[in-house]
Amino acid sequence: MAGVSTTPETPETPETHGTAPEAPEARQSPADRARNEVVEVALGKLDLDTKARLLAGQDMWSLPALPEIGLKSLVMSDGPIGVRGVRWTADDPSVALPSPTALAATWDQDLARRAGRLLAQEARRKSVHVLLAPTVNLHRSPLGGRHFECYSEDPYLTGAIGTGYVQGVQDGGVGTTVKHFVANDAETDRFTVDNIITSRPLRELYLAPFEAIVKNARPWGIMAAYNQVNGVTMTEHSHLQNKVLRAEWGFDGYIVSDWMAARSTTGDILGGLDVAMPGPQTVYGDALAGAVRAGEVDESVVDDAVRNVLRLAARVGILDGATPVVGELPASVDGQALAREVARRAFVLVRNEPRDGAPVLPIDASRVRKVALIGGPARDARVLGGGSATVFPERVVAPLDGLTAALPDGVLSYTVGADPSDELAPAEKGFELQAVCRDASGTVIGTRGLPSGQIQWIGDDLPDGVTHGTLHSVEVKGTFTPRDSGEHTFGTRGLGAFTLTVGDEVLYEGVQEMGDEADPFEAFFGSPAERGRVQLAAGEPVEVSLAHTVNPDAAGPLSAIMFSFVHSTPLRDPDELIAEAVEAARDADTAVVVVATTERVESEGFDRTDLSLPGRQDDLVRAVAAVNPNTVVIVNSGSPVEMPWREDVAAVLLSWFPGQEGGAALADVLLGAEEPGGRLPTTWPASLADAPVTEVTPTNGELHYAEGVFIGYRAWDRAGVAPAYPFGHGLGYTTWEYESLEATPTEAKVCVRNTGSRTGREVVQIYLAPTADPVERPARWLAGFASVEAGPGEAVEVEIPLAGRAFEIWDAQADAWSFVPGTYEVRACHSLTDRRLTATLDIQA
Ligand code: BGC
């Protein structure tokens, strides 16, 4: 048995590109074998140039069709909370589920599977064959910009939810790409950062969810990350891709690059990368055929990659002669209903104090006289996180909409209180816009109606009659009828030449150059620039126009037109807003304050710099709580925020980014039609200073995961510091008695009784804690869990399998997993720190 390892990852020996039929025979069904035969025949008909072309994106989202072998074009799309489809626009809407953090907070693999089935249905509706999801990187630091898009700080919970998700999507005959392989746990310098991770944390934490999903759900795809791990760019990482993922775990799907991650023809193909996305300019295609002809790459390596792609095509049913994996589709899913169910099952009630003898929640709708709803995000809800995870839902139920529908007339009042969304965002509410396309002579060559001021025309998605060759300028023009009087702010997002006019005032005429970030997605995710302010009157329409001269270089190697006409409403005096809210709260039985992060706080392409709520939201909560003891705060964020006022309010409910039906689900739980079902999938710190890992910025290009296996609760335990709320915490509306626990090395059998007066759901959590440790390990870790439901007075017995890996560590010297004998406490818990029953296991090798 080895001690703790600090040995760096063993330098890899060159492996060959992983091949299809090398997936363990035992795992291949007769149907797999039949598909593989069709694949072999198809492969045999392709020449080198065609094979190399198949491995390169033909545009932003798809691979070329090869009619000569009966192969249709394979279409991919993001992911993970909905299926955007190939167009990046609100006029092609999608169901928006709650954020991945929310899905993980349900601690329910079956629910994740049902979510996956809905997404497969959405993918089919949009002619998408592969969903670019799920994101299973870990919550290493709460500063990670895409924290909201990952599941948890715990690899086991991440693997379990990811397994359900992948199974669900693939039940519907649609592929997944589990991403981002591996260690894309933060965003700063994501294209270049070299994450230095010793083999033990790499195996026990960061690779573990991928391993679990590969073994339990057999995903048809994996996405290789941008970053490097221990000096090797992930798309070229032969050791991790060819040896660990394929040879060791038996992965038999395709590996696709993250978008623009593939940077070396020979490095990538020898490193195991099958497909370079997006196109049309990639390091594969002609360059790959050239590398084979130059003798740098053996053609058999290209064949392996083509096999992997053809096998995927066969599985999803776009290769003639091959029987797709799914013949009969699962029953159709009601997207709105499921979005609402997942949201309420994900809400985590972290605090619910008694007031007048009973907890403040749920609110008794039959007796409540006045509810004061407060907060900008209560009206303009933030239902999803930004970046590539963005989808455009057909409708959004904000908390104001949900509570208005659920409460009797006259009970609800609304005040803004504080508005964190004072940032410029694509022009939408009150705007009637169209795009007018002109050629170099100024002649109009096409027009398109626009649902918002955001233009993302990728590839051939252009207005009728327009081509990239003829298009010279795009003017976004129309009218704006303001909701509020006052000083409105207008601006631009994107690169190139712009002229912005409101009424007859030219607010800006100039050229926006690329910023220092040099992120090729700058035009997608870059900061909007303010260009001027105009005094406008509510209800009075004004003409607006943003003319943009097309800059062929702005989108890097993509053929794309990407820019936005952005706007923000007049900002009112923050003290006045708070004072108004206080007056409304003073007079109410219950004050419900919704606070939120914004797109500038949680999105893709950058990390957070702090965990505080933007704007004056903390002041607002304190002021409201000071006048109303029944103050309930709803925290609308995808990841942790500091809540310095949490002990001063009656209840705190974390709603995550709750998806399109969030407001309806919120009314369900606030008024007690349903209980909030979530448990924290990640430790919620009281302040950033307490968080164990706060360094996400590389030094000299390297980011050292110096904390080893101690992230999340493993680190909090070691530091002996108490967070605001521990991992696994969450309250419902009933109470539970843990009546019995029996444990074997493979299973914990737990009996729990609902001792309250209403039906409820409990997440029974099993933690293992070694009583003495021959190796340095965390004090305890999650080894299994189950979600159970019971009526009042009812008992349920549940058998919870214990993960085999829970008793093992990665032995760096032996380069293998190693069982650690000893005495273990098996703890049946309501949360990490709320232990109910303990059994002891003495396990020897
Ligand atoms: C993201 C991926 C995403 C891809 C395509 C990248 O910037 O990192 O998660 O799937 O874009 O949108």
Image: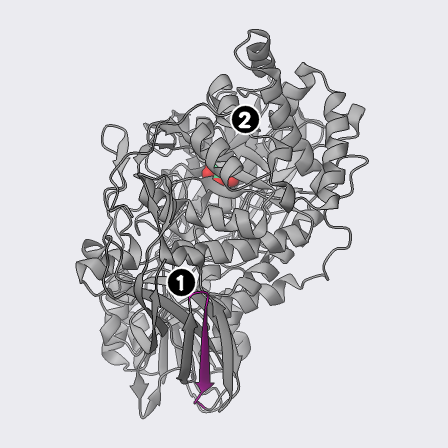
Q: Is residue 285 left or right of residue 566?
A: right
- Which residue is tagged 1? 783
- Which residue is tagged 2? 17
User: Could you tell me how many numbered marks the image carries?
Assistant: 2
Give the x, y percent position of residue 398: 49, 65
Q: Please identify the residue farthest to the right as the structure is shown.
A: 321
For label 1, count other residues whose C-alpha is less than 10 Å away and answer few (under 14), some (14-19) or many (20+): many
Relative vertical location of residue 481 with respect to residue 302 in this rendering, above or below? below
Determine if residue 598 is in view: yes
Give the x, y percent position of residue 713: 29, 59
Instruction: Please name whichever residue, 388 or 465, is drawn nearer the observer in this view of the structure.
Output: 388
Q: Please identify the residue farthest to the front as the structure is shown.
A: 845
Q: Is residue 786 left or right of residue 110?
A: left
Q: In this picture, which residue range is highlighted in magenta?
A: 745-756
Task: Look at 39% across and 38% down and name the residue there.
Answer: 605
Q: Is residue 399 left or right of residue 820?
A: right
- Give the residue type at disc 1: Ala
Relative vertical location of residue 357 with respect to residue 809 in this rendering, above or below? below
